[in-house]
Each structure stands twice: as C-alpha cells, then as structure tokens.
Amino acid sequence: MNSNRAAGTSSSRSSMNDIDKAMVLKLMKIFLALVFAGWIFVWTMRPTNTFRNTWSPKLYADTSSTYFGRLGTTILIYAFPVMFIAVLGCIYLHLHEKNGDKKNQGSSRFSSSLATWKRPVLVRGPLGVVSGIELTFSLMFLALLVWCFSTYLKISFANLTVHHSEKVWQAKLDSAALRLGLIGNLCCAFLFFPVTRCSSLLPLVGLTSESSIKYHIWLGHIVMVLFTAHGVCYFIFWASTNQLDEMIKWSKTDIANVPGELALLSGLALWATTFPRIRRNMFELFYYTHHLYIAFFFFYMLHVGIGFICMILPGIFLFMVDRYLRFLQSRTKVHLVSVRLLPSEGIELNFSKNPGKKLST
C-alpha cells in the first residue's frame, strides 16, 4: 500500500514538473515573440515624425554610450533585440529538446489549424510553390515596405527644399532616391536570416534552412531592385542638374558616392547570375560570383557609414558565425571503407565517421 502511494506521489510530482517546464517554455516563446514584435515596431515607426522628433532624441539622450556615443544607441535599438532572441532561442531549443515533445490537446489543435495555412496557395508562377502562411507574411512585409516608403515621401515632400538651380521634380527625385536607399537598407536587415543554418532563429519559427532559401531569394531580388532604382534615380538627378562630377566624389565625412557605385556594380554582377537559367546551367559561375556579397557589403559600408551597417548588423553577424561553424564542420575527415556497385547500377558507399561506427549510403 505504501509503495503504491509513493509511486502515485512521484508520478504526480513528475507530471507537475512537466507542466511547469511546459509553462516556462511557453512564456519564453511569448517573450521572444514580444521582443521580435518590438523590433519590427521600431522599423515601422522609424519613418514617422514621432520617432524622428520625439522618440529618437530621448533615446539618444538616455542611452548614449561613453565609448560608442550615438552608435551605441543604434546597436541597442536595432542589433541587440535580434542578438538577444538568438541567444535566448538557443536556451529555449535546448530546454525544449530536453523536455521532450509532449504536446497537449490545445497544441495539437493549434498544429492542425496551422497545417491548413501551410497548404499551397500558389503553385504556378515565378515564386514557385507558396503556402498560405508564406503568402500572408510576404504581403505583410510588402505592406511594411510600402508604408515606410510612402511615409518617408510624405514627410520629405512636405519639407521639400528646392535650390535655385533645381526644379521641383528634380528635388522630389533626389528625395525619392534617398528614400529608396533607406528602404533597401531595411530589406538588408532581413536578408541573411533565412541562410543562417546554424542559428536558432529558423528552428524557433519551425523553419529549416532548405525551406528558407526561397525567402533569401525573394529578399535578394527586392534589395537589388531597390538599390538599382536608388542608383538610377541619382544618376538621372545628377545628369539633369549638371552634377555628373558627383559620381567621382568620395567624401570622408558624408555619403561617399564612389563606394556606392562599386557596391551597386558588385550587386548587379551577383544578381545577374542568380536567375534560374544561369544558376541551373552554370552553377559554378553562380556559386563563385555569389561571393561578391563580400565586396558589396564592404563598399556599402564605405558608402553609408558604420551607423547604417549597425542597423543590419544582426543578420551579417549571425551569417558570419554560421559560415565559420560550417567551415569547422567541413574540416571533419571521413574514411571510405568500401565501395560496391549494386545490380540496379547504384553505388553503395560505406564511410567510417567515428571509431567503431559506420555509415552506409
């Protein structure tokens, strides 16, 4: 009798512990979602006068660092939230794996309702197979870009300054070109997230690196369209106002035009090889040309300065860490034990990964 009571008590305690752990995991995930929503909210409010005239001065006054100055505030607002999500996400995934995949009835209902959103909505088209949830978030992201660009234009046109040698349309073109660059910088903040295979960001939202590649492709096309339009608009502006000498100016304190042009040329060369016909038929050309992203972001940093780079720093930093981890993994040596030709003309390879362990493929 006593043994039965003890067993019942221990089982009830273990069930209570499981409930507590599940509650902690849910609270952690909700907290991470709130941090990410706050980060998105900052990007949403950035074009507004409220952020520029009210929030931004107060933030810079309260969080300005002794060593980093105003740059510290930029890192705190734009870089720290994503870094925090990545670190806390690692802890969450570790606890989730340790706790086991114990789903209750509510979570199963949520999974079943989410499965309907994951069904394909678009099958034929330039985007390939797109599910309902992918289409929804894509439209939300495009709405964010349209909102930011329209707000930037509305505020800039309301305070438009026309110089003596300019016409109104030229001043508006100058303003629109600058805002296109700002929207391109916003897209760069998301560009590397889908290709950070070893980070915790993708598993947190239930994605894999293979399924996320298309998001990187979509973002890459949007980035290059915006930056190309940015460069073309400025070229038209300089040509129409007899300021083509601006193309060879390299300012040390303001926006440097020459690095921007070099960044755009690097991006165009990279972009030209990403289209399916070239990528599939000449993959090596696509692969090696894709390394021009290093030149692109190097010249982009020289073009806009370190402040704008810090705004998109999380994606770049996580991608660099991911590349380093993959480099370490690629150095693992595998010993080939045997090779056998099968009757179906397939090849069986036996590898020895660890002492005493064999892997067959």
Image (cartoon, helix red, strand yellow):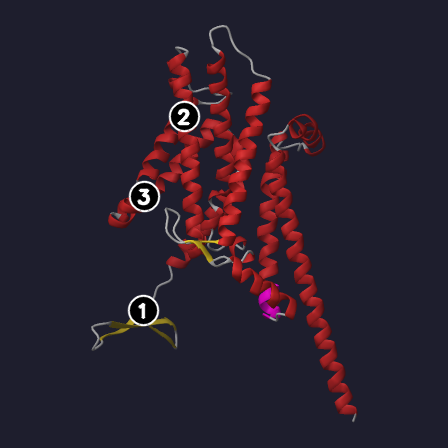
Splitting the image into 4 quarters, where does residue 150 fall? top right
Quadrant of the frame with the C terminus? bottom left
Residue at horizontal 52 percent and vertical 57 percent from the top: 117
Amino acid at the residue labelled 1: His
Splitting the image into 4 quarters, where does residue 90 fall? bottom right
- Which secondary structure lies at badge 1? strand
- In the rendered image, residue 100 lying in the magenta stretch gets the answer yes
Magenta stretch: helix, strand or loop mostly? helix
Amino acid at the residue labelled 2: Gly
Q: Is residue 280 left or right of residue 65?
A: left
Q: Position of residue 63 (x, y in %)?
A: 69, 34
Which label number is shown at residue 231? 2
Quadrant of the frame with the N terminus? bottom right
Region rendered in magenta: 95-101
Which label number is shown at residue 275? 3
Residue 361 sits above or below residue 76 on the image: below
Return the residue nearer the eye: 354 or 188: 188
C-alpha distance separating marks 2 and 1: 52 Å
Q: Position of residue 311 (x, y in %)?
A: 55, 36
